[in-house]
Image (cartoon, rainbow, N blue to C red):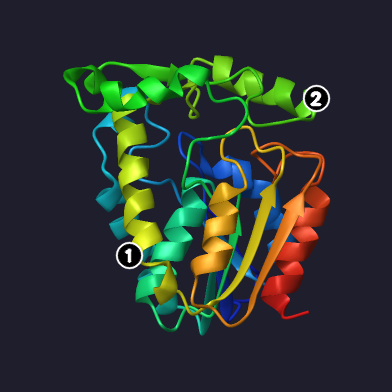
Amino acid sequence: MIEIKQSITANKAILLLHGMTGEPAELYYLGKYLHRLGFDVYIPELPGHCQGTEALKRTTWQDWLNFSFEEYDRLKKEYDVVYISGICLGAVLALCVAMERDDLEKIACLSTTLFLDGWSIPKIIFLLPVVLYTVIKFFYAWPESSSLGVKNEKVRGKVQEALEKDDAKILDCFPAISILQILRLSRYTIKRLSKVKSEVLIIHSERDDIASTKSGDIVYKNIGSKIKEYIKLKDSYHLIVLDDEKDFVFKKTGDFFMGL
């Protein structure tokens, strides 16, 4: 858990949820930016993450969802206002919390991942059902693409260095059984998007290497929110909070939560 708090207790907080196979640190700079705007920021580790491949394989989409509810409810006991933002899997979880918590006024969905259909996904993805619905799913893992979700070469190099550390918290692969879990969560989410009434900001890159804008399109079209904004980026891959347009993403997210 990363906590970025004011010296004097604030009355508003933001819960940031990281992505599939990722870690809280990927949202640290966004958290620092939001902290400067007056929010206390909490970036927890999702269940099964940051503990290696086997730990991730033992968790289900319900584990991720229940954890997100618990974190939001915990913060609501401490703060007058709590908002949520998430990237990738974290964005999907933010939508799910908004479906069930009427007092959640605003969520920001970054690189929402309902489908694994980005340009770096291997063409043999059509074999995924064969893998997911056989015993193979317990053993196979899709390797991380060479793009690593980042267009900026310097940042990509830092991500590569983090992957190569002996104590790396992020993974260089996507376990097949975990892909099955995120796809089940996706189906659950899509069926219930009309229940989302919160104000919603959606930011997605047209060059996302993991999930195409199809995910953002479906969210924008089907949520029940009266106030919603959809921004498409042109110069980033999946990890838009680390890539070339991160400053723009930070500002738009901050302005959204500040009501500007």
Query: Looking at the image, do the residues carrying marks 2 and 1 touch, with CB atoms under 8 Å apart?
Result: no
Q: What residue sits right under mark 2 in the picture? A: 154
The x and y percentages for residue 114 are 46, 47
Kind of residue sitting beneath label 2: Lys
Which residue lies at the image location 37% right of the left edge and 19% below the top edge?
Answer: 141
* Residue 73 vs residue 88, the one in the foreground: 88
Between residues 120 and 164, which one lies in front from this camera angle? 120
Q: Is residue 64 left or right of residue 98?
A: left
Q: Is residue 1 visible?
A: no
The residue indicated by pointer 1 is 70
Closer to the N terminus: mark 2 or mark 1?
1
Q: Is residue 39 left or right of residue 174?
A: right
Furthest residue toward front: 126
Query: Residue at (49%, 52%) from the top-left corner?
Result: 90
Crowd rating for badge 1 (residues with CA inside 10 Å; few <14, some 14–19, many 20+): few
Dot 2 falls on a residue whose secondary structure is: helix
User: What residue is shown at x 27% (from left), y 22% (from top)?
Assistant: 130
Could you tell me if residue 13 is visible in this image? yes
Density class for disc 2 (Cα within 10 Å; few <14, some 14-19, many ≥20) is few
In the image as oriented, which residue stretches furthest toward the left?
135
Snapshot quadrant of residue 93: bottom left
Seen in the picture, residue 60 relative to 161 is either above or below; the reply is: below
Q: Seen in the image, is 30 located left or right of residue 105?
A: right
Residue 73 higher or lower than 176, as above or below = below
Q: Which mark is residue 188?
A: none
Distance from the alpha carbon under mark 2 to that under mark 1: 37 Å
Q: Where's the C terminus, which quadrant?
A: bottom right
Label 1 sits on what residue type?
A: Glu
Q: Kindly state the secondary structure of the residue where label 1 is placed.
A: helix
Residue 3 drawn at (x, y percent): 55, 56
**223 w.r.t. 18: above or below:** below
Residue 16 spot, x, y in % from top left: 54, 57
